[in-house]
Image (tube, coloured by chain):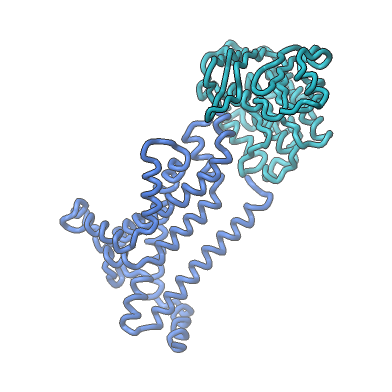
Chain colours: A blue, B cyan
Amino acid sequence: MGDAIAEAFRLIAVGDAALWEIVSLSLRVSLTAVALACLIGLPLGALLAIARFPGRGALIVATNSLMGLPPVLAGLLVYLLLSRAGPLGPLELLYTPTAMIIAQTVLVTPIIVALSRQVIADMHQEYDEQLRSMGITTMGAVLTLLYDARLSLLTVALAGFGRAAAEVGAVMMVGGNINHVTRVMTTTIALETSKGNLAIAVGLGLVLMLIALTVNGALMALRGTQGVARHV
Amino acid sequence: MSDALVTSGRRTLTPARGPDSVLPVAMDGVGYTIDGVTLLDDVSLRIRPGRLTAIMGANGAGKTLCLRLIQGLLQPTVGTLSHASGPVTLTGRRRIATVFQRPVLLRRSVAGNLRHALKTYRVPRAERAAMLTDLLDLAELRALAHRSARVLSSGEQQRLSIVRALAADPDLLLLDEPTANLDPYATRMIETLIRQAEARGVTVVLVTHDVGQARRLADDVVFLNRGRVTEQTPAGSFFDEPQTAEAAAYLAGRLLL
């Protein structure tokens, strides 16, 4: 075990090409998926927080439930969509990074919707009367709330990124874990562990942890600078 | 407080208002009941342009509810509430501005709050910078323009709330106990600001418990007791010769709801 960890640090230190190719693809897939999920999920969460319409309660329950969507189920759904016989089969996206991005977007969007709805609903409770007295439109209220809740929403996006970067089932099913094409950190860790090649598995595990620490640290630093007395 | 700014700014700052003014506002037989509890009953009153109306009454008399109805945030359950310009639409609501007792400021800088208001009120982009400077000076907050609005003192927050409301260039400004919990200096600054708003041609309705403040500022007084208007009279008459036992008791500090 000690040898594996030492070898892992060596791989990171020397910038092992294979390792960094996997890390780079993982980041590209997960960050793109989170960006797409935010584009879809933040406005949807804001609308769910402030709009009143029939079926809103059911929609909130549904999005809350989908936060726990098993990755393999998300993978299966996307697989069925993208497989040769599926409705999007002609696009030939299966076993490509795009398929992995779609699967992770499906997985992360409910998290973004549900958490952002809660953040924005709390803020809306405070702002509602003031904004209505200003004669603001619903869209204006959504934009105001999204802007003012931006720091909390960054944390929401971070939770989404955590979910995307750590999942293995969905990307395995729709990506296929093809070397140099769709192999990401989590699928590699699973594969290399099963092969007994612990060095690269531990190395990637360390990189995953480092990414999580870096992102959290950056967010805390941002909160620090924004949270004091300097708003623009 | 800069008096020069009373005559500056983007629009005509005279008491004369256009034909689309919401004033006068009339409440006729207005009642408001919720969950079987009647909070306002048969309220009839007039808000006339150019007259500062103070709404007074004990806690729970229905003063704040009156403001919410006038603003259009709530609808009367009985009676009619009419504005000279017709039913209050979303855009029309901007002709009436409300400053709440507890200021609700956005999580932005002082200037950011004002910029948001100017944008919301559709002030042309080219005029926003000058308006922003005017409003900051009016509130004496220029030095704090980049400070987070939520770390200001209570008096500064209330001044910011008032000038944010003035960014709408409203016909009618509704102030809900704007000096509650403020020290005498901060209160005096708010009162000066109210006078400056009037000089800009804004008609003010002021909910206050401060009898001295009402004496200093009000032209008319509406006295509410248990959800009913018991007096609506020029301020001088109200303070010198209250017509009802409730008003006399209130002024003497003896009226409880």
Q: Picture quarter containing residue B115? A: top right
Q: Picture quarter containing residue A179? A: bottom left
Q: Check the image and report above or below for B120 versus B20.
A: below
Q: Is residue A168 left or right of residue B42?
A: left
Q: Position of residue A86 (x, y in %)?
A: 18, 54
Give the camera-side residue of B148 and B4. B148
Q: Check the image and report above or below for B155 versus B166.
A: below
Q: Position of residue A56 (x, y in %)?
A: 39, 41
Q: The N terminus of chain A appears in which quarter of the rendering?
A: bottom left
Q: Residue at x 53, y 27 (%)?
A: B36
Q: Residue at x 78, y 36 (%)?
A: B182
Give the camera-side residue of A99 and A77. A77
Q: Residue at x 65, y 13 (%)?
A: B46
Q: Position of residue B33 (x, y in %)?
A: 55, 25
Q: Is residue B26 left or right of residue A36?
A: right
Residue B20 appears anywhere in the view: no
Q: Picture quarter containing residue B64? A: top right
Residue B5 appears anywhere in the view: yes
Q: Check the image and report above or below for A172 versus A119.
A: below
Count of numbered labels shown in the rendering:
0
Give the camera-side residue of B241 and A154. B241
Q: Position of residue B244 (x, y in %)?
A: 76, 15
